[in-house]
Image (cartoon, rainbow, N blue to C red):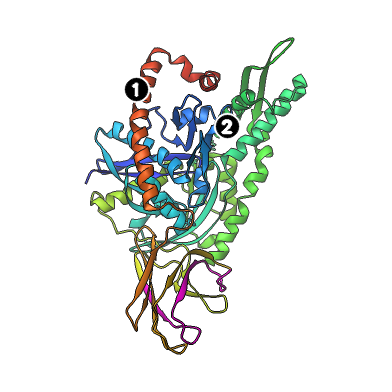
C-alpha cells in the first residue's frame, strides 16, 4: 500500500498529514502554509487557482471564486463557470487534488490512499459526496471519519481510560460542538450541536466594520462598494485579528486605499484587544447555546465532562478560550495545534488501517437513525443512531392492502417518529410480491452500513425470494458515470495545472514581489 494521508477537508481551510517515523506530521503546501484555504477560482484567462492564490483574488473576482463549498456537499447545487456546471464534489476534488499533489511533492512518492474527515452531523449523502470528491481527485478513500473523533485520536484518547470529552470546534465559517464517549475499543459521538454560519470570518467582518468606520470618520468616504479596497480590508482585518490573539494592540496600515481628485487616501489606525473583544462579544456569546444544547442532548452537566478539546483556528482567540473556561468550569486542552489536530487524527486512523500504528481499532457510529416509511406516515426505525459501524440489521414487514403486489420502500434518516418529519434518502419499488391477503407476505428489509457510513438497503419478498436494493447516494449525489466523467476532467486538468505551476515557479523565482502584492493578483485576472 502506498503512503496514506489524512485529510481535514475544511469549510475554510484544509490540512493534510501523514505518518512519518511513527508520528503524525502535517505536510506544508508548496506555498509553505500548513493549512490551505478551501477556495477554488477560475480566472478569466482560463486558469484554475486553488488555495492561497484563489483566496487572494476572491473579492476582485467574486463571481468566479468559490469558497465554503463544503456547505453544499451532497446537495443539488452546481456552480456555473464559462458555460460549464461544477458540482460541489468536483470543486472539493480540486482542493483534494492540490493537497494530494503537495503531499506527493513533500513525501517524494505518489500518494493514492486517504482518510478524509467530515463533521459528525454529515448525512449519508454528504459523506458519499465527500468520498466521491476523493475519487475524482484520484484518491482511494479508505475511510471517512468524524472530525471530533479524529481530534480525539490526535490527542491519543483512544489509549486512555473511558471518558467523556467535549470537542469545541470554531473554524473559519462553522462552529461545531460534539460530546464523545471514549470506551476501551471505540469512540462514540453521543451529541452534536452547532451553527453552520458562525466562525472566524464573522470576527473578520467585525474588524472590517471597525476599519470602514474609522476611514469614514477620517475621510468622509464609504469604501464598502469598492472591491479592491474591500479585498485589502478583509486581509488586514484577518491579520489584525490573528495578531490580537497574542498582542494587546495592533496597528493597521493601508496606504493608497482610495483615490480622490485631491490625491490618494490612506488608512492608519490601531485596534486594541479590549476593543476587538467588545466588537466580537456577541459572536463568542453565540457559541454558548450549542454548548448547552450538546450537554442537554448527552444528558450531562459540565462537571461530568472529563476533557474539553479546542479545535479550529478561531479557538486561538483569547476571549473564546476564556468563554469555554467559564462555561465548562475547567481549563481546555490546547496542547495540539487546533487547526492541525483533525488532519493528524485522520492520518493516525490511516496508520491504524495500514498497520503503521498499533492501536485499538477505531469504531465510528451512525450519526442518525435509519429506517423506512410504513402505513400512516410512520417511521419504522431499523438502525438506531449511535450504532457502531459497520452494521447489518433486518426487519420483516408485510403489505397494507389485500392482493398488493408491489411496495415502495422509502428510506428515511432522522429521529422523528413520523416519516414526513425525517429526511428521505431515496425510494425504490419491490414488485412481484406473491398475491395474498394483507398481512400475509413477508418482506424482509435489510440495512447494511459500511465503515464509511455508506448505506445499502435491500428488500426481499421471503415468499418469492425476489429482491431489490439501492445504495444510498442521495438525490444530490453523482452517478458512477458522472464521477467517471469528472475524474477524466480532473486528469485532463492535472496536466494543465502542472504546466501552470511550473510556469508559476519559474515566474516567482524571477519576481517574488508580485506574490506579495494583492493588487497585482487582482490585476492578473482582469
Ligand atoms: P480553520 O478552519 O480551523 O483553519 O480556522 C480558520 C480560522 O481561524 C480563520 O478564520 C482564521 O482567521 C482563524 N485563525 C487562525 N489563526 C488564528 C489566530 N491565531 N487567532 C485568531 N484566529 C485565528
> Dot 1: what SS?
helix
Q: Is mark 1 within 8 Å of ligand 1?
A: no
Pick the front one: 132 or 142: 132
> Dot 2: what SS?
helix
Where is residue 358? Give x, y as percent: 25, 53
Indicate left or right for 109 with 320 as reference: left
Where is residue 52? Give x, y as percent: 47, 30
Indicate left or right for 172 with 185 as reference: right
Residue name at image x 33 percent, y 81 percent: 464
Pick the front one: 158 or 496: 496
- Crowding at dot 1, Cα within 10 Å, few <14 / some 14-19 / many 20+, comes out as few
Residue name at image x 42 percent, y 13 percent: 511
Indicate left or right for 349 with 37 as reference: left
Magenta stretch bounds: 393-420
Where is residue 267? Give x, y as percent: 67, 19
According to the picture, the residue beneath numbered tag 2 turns out to be 62
According to the picture, the residue beneath numbered tag 1 turns out to be 502
Circle 1/circle 2 CB separation < 8 Å: no
- Crowding at dot 2, Cα within 10 Å, few <14 / some 14-19 / many 20+, comes out as few
Tell me if residue 431 is in the magenta stretch: no
Residue name at image x 50 percent, y 83 percent: 400
Vertical order, 321 against 505 (above or below): below
Q: Is residue 363 visible?
A: yes
Q: Is mark 2 within 8 Å of ligand 1?
A: no
Q: Is residue 337 visible?
A: no
Vertical order, 246 against 8 (above or below): above
Vertical order, 494 against 483 (above or below): above
First-in-chain label (1 vs 2): 2
Pick the front one: 435 or 63: 435
Where is residue 416? Give x, y as percent: 56, 70
Tell me if residue 402 is in the magenta stretch: yes
Pick the front one: 203 or 461: 461
Amino acid at each position: 500500500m502506498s503512503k496514506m494521508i489524512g485529510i481535514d477537508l475544511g469549510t475554510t481551510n484544509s490540512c493534510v498529514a501523514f505518518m512519518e517515523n511513527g508520528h503524525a506530521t502535517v505536510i506544508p503546501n508548496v506555498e509553505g502554509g500548513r493549512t490551505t484555504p478551501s477556495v477554488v477560482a477560475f480566472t478569466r484567462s482560463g486558469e484554475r487557482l486553488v488555495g492561497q492564490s484563489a483566496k487572494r483574488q476572491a473579492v476582485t473576482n467574486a463571481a468566479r471564486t468559490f469558497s465554503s463549498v463544503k456547505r453544499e456537499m451532497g446537495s443539488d447545487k452546481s456552480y456555473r463557470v464559462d458555460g460549464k456546471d461544477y458540482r460541489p464534489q468536483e470543486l472539493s476534488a480540486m482542493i483534494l487534488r492540490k493537497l494530494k499533489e503537495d503531499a506527493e511533492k513533500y513525501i517524494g512518492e505518489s500518494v493514492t490512499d486517504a482518510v478524509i474527515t467530515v463533521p459528525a452531523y454529515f448525512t449519508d449523502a454528504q459523506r458519499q459526496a465527500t468520498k466521491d470528491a476523493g475519487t475524482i481527485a484520484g484518491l482511494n478513500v479508505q475511510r471517512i471519519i468524524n472530525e471530533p473523533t479524529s481530534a480525539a485520536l490526535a490527542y491519543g484518547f483512544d489509549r486512555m481510560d473511558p471518558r467523556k470529552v467535549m470537542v469545541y470546534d470554531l473554524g473559519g465559517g462553522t462552529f461545531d460542538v460534539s460530546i464523545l464517549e471514549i470506551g476501551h475499543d471505540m469512540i462514540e459521538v453521543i451529541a452534536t450541536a452547532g451553527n453552520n454560519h458562525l466562525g472566524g470570518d464573522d470576527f473578520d467582518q467585525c474588524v472590517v466594520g471597525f476599519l470602514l468606520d474609522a476611514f469614514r470618520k477620517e475621510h468622509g468616504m464609504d469604501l464598502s462598494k469598492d472591491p479592491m479596497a474591500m479585498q485589502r480590508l478583509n486581509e488586514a482585518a484577518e491579520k489584525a485579528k490573528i495578531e490580537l490573539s497574542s498582542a494587546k494592540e495592533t496597528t493597521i496600515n493601508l496606504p493608497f486605499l482610495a483615490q480622490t481628485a485631491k490625491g490618494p487616501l490612506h488608512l492608519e489606525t490601531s485596534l486594541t484587544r479590549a476593543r476587538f473583544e467588545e466588537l466580537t462579544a456577541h459572536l463568542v456569546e453565540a457559541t454558548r447555546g450549542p454548548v448547552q444544547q450538546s450537554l442537554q442532548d448527552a444528558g450531562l452537566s459540565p462537571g461530568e465532562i472529563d476533557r474539553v478539546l479546542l479545535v479550529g483556528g478561531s479557538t486561538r482567540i483569547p476571549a473564546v478560550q476564556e468563554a469555554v473556561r467559564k462555561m465548562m468550569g475547567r481549563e481546555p486542552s490546547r496542547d495540539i495545534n487546533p487547526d492541525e489536530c483533525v488532519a493528524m487524527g485522520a492520518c493516525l486512523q490511516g496508520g491504524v488501517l495500514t498497520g503503521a500504528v498499533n492501536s485499538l481499532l477505531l469504531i465510528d457510529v451512525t450519526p442518525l437513525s435509519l429506517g423506512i416509511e410504513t402505513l400512516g406516515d410512520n417511521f419504522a426505525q431499523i438502525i438506531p443512531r449511535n450504532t457502531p459501524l459497520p452494521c447489518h440489521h433486518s426487519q420483516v414487514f408485510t403489505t397494507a392492502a389485500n392482493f398488493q403486489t408491489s411496495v415502495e420502500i422509502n428510506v428515511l434518516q432522522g429521529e422523528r417518529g413520523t416519516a414526513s418529519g425525517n429526511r428521505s434518502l431515496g425510494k425504490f419499488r419491490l414488485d412481484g410480491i406473491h398475491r395474498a391477503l394483507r398481512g400475509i407476505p413477508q418482506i424482509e428489509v435489510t440495512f447494511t452500513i459500511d465503515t464509511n457510513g455508506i448505506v445499502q438497503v435491500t428488500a426481499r419478498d421471503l415468499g418469492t425470494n425476489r429482491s431489490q436494493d439501492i445504495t444510498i447516494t442521495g438525490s444530490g449525489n453523482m452517478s458512477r458515470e458522472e464521477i467517471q466523467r469528472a475524474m477524466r476532467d480532473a486528469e485532463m486538468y492535472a496536466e494543465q495545472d502542472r504546466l501552470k505551476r511550473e510556469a508559476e515557479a519559474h515566474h516567482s523565482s524571477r519576481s517574488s514581489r508580485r506574490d506579495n502584492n494583492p493588487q497585482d493578483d487582482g490585476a492578473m485576472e482582469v
